[in-house]
Amino acid sequence: MQTQLEKNKAIVTRFNKAFIEQGDLQAFEEIVAPDFINHTAASVNQPSGREGVSNFIMNVLRVAVADIRVEIYDQVAEGDTVVTRKAIIGKQVGDFMGKPATGQQITMNIIDIIRLRNGQYTEHWSLRNIQ
């Protein structure tokens, strides 16, 4: 039987693989709570709620970066929180984060901290480094 900590890590993995990697909006709707708060939005113009995350992934990241894959290196879970060290990798085919398209592979090294409630994302913090 899966512990709650294992279930929480599986939810975070599903968000990364189904939504970020595959663009599955149904997964997003199931995983992200209506009152979700993103404490580290990717830009100052991005809303801090769920619509900001959805817009960034679907209309910024997935437009500017092709062949996206998410590599999860480590996950640590405690209580209602999951910390994930990961990379989002793809080919930059459009303007992204102020940089013009290069046609080259980019790697975004990320450490995410996710707080969950009832199997859904409620809060997010992140550290990012784009190469």
Image (cartoon, helix red, strand yellow):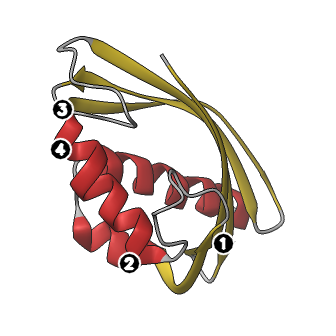
Numbered badge on residue 63: 4
Mark 2 touching mark 3, by CB under 8 A? no
Of labels 2 and 3, the one closer to you: 3
Say what amino acid the circle numbered 3 marks.
Answer: Gly
What's the distance in space between the residues labelled 4 and 2, CA to CA? 23 Å
Mark 1 and mark 3 lie on one chain; the one further toward the N terminus is 3
Say what amino acid the circle numbered 4 marks.
Answer: Val
Q: Residue furthest top?
A: 104
Say what amino acid the circle numbered 1 marks.
Answer: Leu
For label 2, the residue is: 30
Mark 2 and mark 3 lie on one chain; the one further toward the N terminus is 2
Mark 4 touching mark 3, by CB under 8 A? yes
What's the distance in space between the residues labelled 2 and 1, CA to CA? 12 Å
For label 3, the residue is: 94
Q: Name the residue at 48% across, 49% down.
A: 13
Foreground residue among 74 and 37: 37
Visible in this render: residue 1?
no
The image shows residue 112 at horizontal and vertical percentages of 64, 46
For label 1, the residue is: 116
